[in-house]
Amino acid sequence: MLMQAKNSTAKQKERRTKSASFTETGRRAQIVAAAIDVIAEVGYHRASFAKIAEHAGLSSTGMISYHFDGRDDLMREVVTEVLRLGDGYLRPRIEAHTRYADRLRASIEGNLDLLAEYPNHLAAMVDILANLRGGDPGMVAFLEATEANLTVQVEQLRKAQRTGEFGDFDPWVMMRAIRAAIDDVVRRATHDPDLDVRAVGRELADLFDRATRKTP
């Protein structure tokens, strides 16, 4: 499930970004958008600078190297952009409800509505996070932020249990199951363009509504 995260970068890069001209900012956004499309199409490992530059209509890969400090830096920006989009899309939907069951449904259906509208964004996000290797500080920070967000979501389930709205189950197991189910739909959608992800979202929301509901 998507969440809001703060990008962790070197001070030098922060200064460069803050002083970037409007044209440079637009070029960075163009490269990030191209990277999202290429990763979604060919996968994380095959998304070379050459393919990204070609998709973006750039004359050479040097333009990418000028704006980003290597592949990891670009991947961080891709994840940041997807998280920014997801947060702006999902937060109003979730916060429009007060009942925990309605908020959970809004979160599940919202994630898959987002997938229907921005299929490449979520496909790229899932593929990047599934292929993280090594100890790059920026990407490790994203994983840590993801786990921190999971903790917050688990606590929401516990609160719903304490109010009596949700039944007796392990909140950590339940939230892991919800997240895994959504991510699996994202992966499936990349191989099945005819999949009705909105309908799947409604079905998953119904499924987890029954799973979390307090029974007499």
Image (spheres, rainbow, N blue to C red):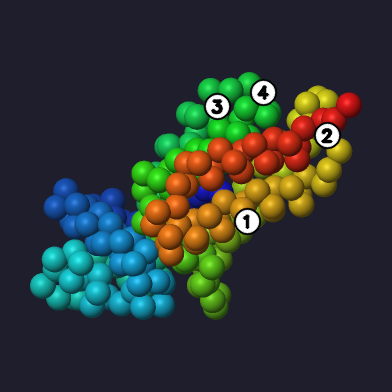
Disc 2 target residue: 167
Furthest-front residue in this view: 194
Q: Nearer the viewer, residue 63 or 216?
A: 216
Which element is circle 1 on? helix
Which element is circle 4 on? loop
Q: Position of residue 63 (x, y in %)?
A: 18, 70
Q: Residue 130, located in which quarter of the rendered image? A: bottom right
Q: Amino acid at mark 4?
A: Arg
Q: Residue at x 28, y 51 (%)?
A: 18
Q: Amino acid at mark 1?
A: Ala
User: What is the spatial separation of the Cα atoms under label 4 and label 3, in whole angstroms?
Assistant: 10 Å
Disc 4 target residue: 99
Disc 3 target residue: 95
User: What is the spatial separation of the Cα atoms under label 1 and label 2, in whole angstroms?
Assistant: 21 Å
Q: What's the mark number on residue 77?
A: none
Please indicate, yes or no, whether residue 5 appears anywhere in the rendered image: yes
Q: Amino acid at mark 3?
A: Glu
Q: Total label count? A: 4
